Image (tube, rainbow, N blue to C red):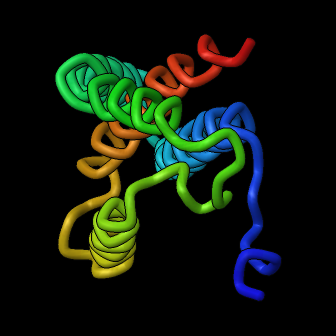
């Protein structure tokens, strides 16, 4: 009975879903940061964007791209039809919840000024988006 209730999809859909989620999260984070930058001076915005892109490049290269490659390899090793929620390992969901909670707390607490948070949000957002391209390259 439980097998019928399990939302199974083809592995290609899991790879696409992963890419879409990473891209969507990346765009969301950059969009939040851009909203914080609207009333800042051009020079401040330039520093924030440059810092964010440099940070994002490092995060992507040294972290997220390696995670994406591991996820792609793991997904390709799954059975042809597998649960739609298998695009991440179960313990990765815990990490996602932790990261989202920390992001919301930093954003809403007011302890860290938004112009200081903006490069971090741009960096993580850019890293997520650029690493999501690895998923799209695997769809054929």
Position of residue 119 in the picture relative to residue 28 (left or right): left
The image shows residue 43 at horizontal and vertical percentages of 35, 21
Q: Is residue 36 above or below residue 59?
A: below
Q: Residue at x 61, y 11 (%)?
A: 137
* Quadrant of the rendered image containing residue 45: top left
Point out the image quarter for the N terminus: bottom right
Q: Residue at x 34, y 57 (%)?
A: 114
The image shows residue 34 at horizontal and vertical percentages of 54, 41
Position of residue 21 in the picture relative to residue 139 (left or right): left
Position of residue 69 in the picture relative to residue 76 (left or right): left
Q: Residue at x 37, y 45 (%)?
A: 121
Position of residue 49 in the picture relative to residue 95 (left or right): right
Tell which residue pokes out farthest to the bottom in this image: 1
Point out the image quarter for the C terminus: top right
Tell how many labels. Answer: 0
Q: Quick check: can you spot residue 103?
A: no
* Quadrant of the rendered image containing residue 133: top right
Tell which residue pokes out farthest to the front in this image: 1
Q: Quick check: can you spot residue 18?
A: yes
Q: Nearer the viewer, residue 102 or 31?
A: 102
Q: Nearer the viewer, residue 8 or 132?
A: 8
Q: Nearer the viewer, residue 125 or 2?
A: 2
The image shows residue 28 at horizontal and vertical percentages of 59, 49
Q: Residue at x 76, y 50 (%)?
A: 9
The image shows residue 92 at horizontal and vertical percentages of 34, 60
């Amino acid at each position: 009975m439980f097998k019928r209730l399990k939302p199974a999809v083809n592995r290609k859909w899991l790879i696409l879903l992963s890419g879409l989620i990473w891209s969507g999260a990346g765009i969301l984070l950059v969009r939040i940061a851009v909203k914080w930058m609207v009333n800042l001076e051009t020079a401040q915005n330039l520093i924030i964007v440059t810092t964010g892109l440099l940070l994002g490049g490092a995060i992507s290269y040294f972290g997220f791209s390696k995670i994406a490659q591991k996820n792609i390899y793991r997904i390709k090793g799954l059975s042809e039809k597998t649960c739609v929620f298998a695009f991440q390992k179960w313990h990765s969901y815990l990490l996602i919840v932790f990261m989202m909670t920390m992001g919301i707390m930093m954003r809403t607490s007011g302890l860290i000024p938004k112009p200081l948070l903006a490069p971090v949000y741009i960096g993580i957002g850019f890293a997520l988006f650029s690493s999501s391209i690895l998923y799209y390259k695997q769809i054929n």
